[in-house]
Image (cartoon, rainbow, N blue to C red):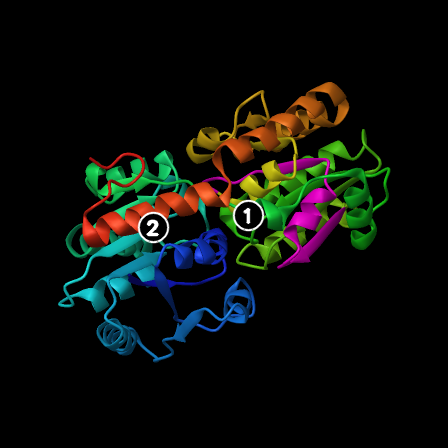
């Protein structure tokens, strides 16, 4: 079986890259088609492992559609798998007339009303994208994969995709890559980051965008500093549309020496190993891969109470959930975790248990293989909710 997929910089791409050996073992050859060459993400890792990566560098959408259609036909591809709006549109159009199914992975909730609170989002452009995405999804897509039930529900409501056309398969991560937490690893990771063993370290992982709510985390940090003089906040993630605002807030709040913006990092597990609490203040999400990795490293979590997050975490068992955009609630809940050592211990233990119960890579890869097989041959029923 030959499948064309895409590759970028986000959590969906990390999950795909780590799943490639499982696909190969199942007799699935993935041709990874990229619209751009990137310095960040997992592209170099995939190429270093001798996987088949092709670049569609034609300057406009029609040119890329022609190039991808030519690739589909010349390689006799059995399935096109797309992720994220630009790739979804490209893959759907390129597959027209080729007689093969198209699978789209839904990894976010981009058309929820909260998007319109983002000053970088144009109401008209978002409306146009939603109309194009919905029409091509309903008419040019065979099936959908959603990473959470919340993402599925959003697609049903906002794009009018029939629920029976969406299979939910959660993301996974490779335990061997992430490793396990230990005091020795924590101490080494802190030294590498210039942190002291006595520091109270908050960790956040996410690109610097309005969606990630990092402005509210900075405000919460400023509230915490008087009571926790050794508090440090570490934020890993590439710069984005919110970077200017974040640095302005940092200056206004007077906490420059408390916060480290690390930019894009390939050593996120080590950064997580250095932390005391993982803080996830996003305003909306499909499911952030860093949440899964934080659980694997046994971190207690304070996160926004939004549908996709509530679906993955267990409130009061491994996480405290707070109202989105609320620095006061963030500060209060972070304080609870920092000061209640027994609570933190229980949360750490349960985080690791949840990861191994639900989010190891072998589980998600097996379910994706089953879905691929069903779409191409019709001989297997995909996991878990397609009739």
| Depth check, front residue: 241 or 365 | 365
Residue in the image at 73% along x and 51% along y: 260
Q: Which image quarter holds the N terminus?
A: bottom left
Q: Is 295 drawn above or below residue 345 in the view shown?
A: below
Residue 347 lies in the magenta stretch? no
Residue 199 relative to residue 3: left or right: right
| Depth check, front residue: 43 or 59 | 43
* Image quadrant assignment for residue 328: top right
Residue 339 is situated, as x and y percent measured from the top left of the image, at 76, 23
Q: Which mark is residue 105?
A: 2
Residue 70 relative to residue 86: left or right: left
Residue 69 is situated, as x and y percent measured from the top left of the image, at 23, 73
Q: Which image quarter holds the C terminus?
A: top left
Q: Which residues are magenta?
A: 259-287
* Image quadrant assignment for residue 100: bottom left
Residue 76 is situated, as x and y percent measured from the top left of the image, at 23, 70
Check disc 2 and report its element: helix, strand or loop.
strand
**Marks 2 and 1, Cα distance to the nearest angstrom?**
20 Å
Q: Residue under circle 1?
A: 174
Q: Is 347 drawn above or below residue 117 in the view shown?
A: above
Check disc 1 and report its element: helix, strand or loop.
loop
Residue 266 lies in the magenta stretch? yes
């Amino acid at each position: 079986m030959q499948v064309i997929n895409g590759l970028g910089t986000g959590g969906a791409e990390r999950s795909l890259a780590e799943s490639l050996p499982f696909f190969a073992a199942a007799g699935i050859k993935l041709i990874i088609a990229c619209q751009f060459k990137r310095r960040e993400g997992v592209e170099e890792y995939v190429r270093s492992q001798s996987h088949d990566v092709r670049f569609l560098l034609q300057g406009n959408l029609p040119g890329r559609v022609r190039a991808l259609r030519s690739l589909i036909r010349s390689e006799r591809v059995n399935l096109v798998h797309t992720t994220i709006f630009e790739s979804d549109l490209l893959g759907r159009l390129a597959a027209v007339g080729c007689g093969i199914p198209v699978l789209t992975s839904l990894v976010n909730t981009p058309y929820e009303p909260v998007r319109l609170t983002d000053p970088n989002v144009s109401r008209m452009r978002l409306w146009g994208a939603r109309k194009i995405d919905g029409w091509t999804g309903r008419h040019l897509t065979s099936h959908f994969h959603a990473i959470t039930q919340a993402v599925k529900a959003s697609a049903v409501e906002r794009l009018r995709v029939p629920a029976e056309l969406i299979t939910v398969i959660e993301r996974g991560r490779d335990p061997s890559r992430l490793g396990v937490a230990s005091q020795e690893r924590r101490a080494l990771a802190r030294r590498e980051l210039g942190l002291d063993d006595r520091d109270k370290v908050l960790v956040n992982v996410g690109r610097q965008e309005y969606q990630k709510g990092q402005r509210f985390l900075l405000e919460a940090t400023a509230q915490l500093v008087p009571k926790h003089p050794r508090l440090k906040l570490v934020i890993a993630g590439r710069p984005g549309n919110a970077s200017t605002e974040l640095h302005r807030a940092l200056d206004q709040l007077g906490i420059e020496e408390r916060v480290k913006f690390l930019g894009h990092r390939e050593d996120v597990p080590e950064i997580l190993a250095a932390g005391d609490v993982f803080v996830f203040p996003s305003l909306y999400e499909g499911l952030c891969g860093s949440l899964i990795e934080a659980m694997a490293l046994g971190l207690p979590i304070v996160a926004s109470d939004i549908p996709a997050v509530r679906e993955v975490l267990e409130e009061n068992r491994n996480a405290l959930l707070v109202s989105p955009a609320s620095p006061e609630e963030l500060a209060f809940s972070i304080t609870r975790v920092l000061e209640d050592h027994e609570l933190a211990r229980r949360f750490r233990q349960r985080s690791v248990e949840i990861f191994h119960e639900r989010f190891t890579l072998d589980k998600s890869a097996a379910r994706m293989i089953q879905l691929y097989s069903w779409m191409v041959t019709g001989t297997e029923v995909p996991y878990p909710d397609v009739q």
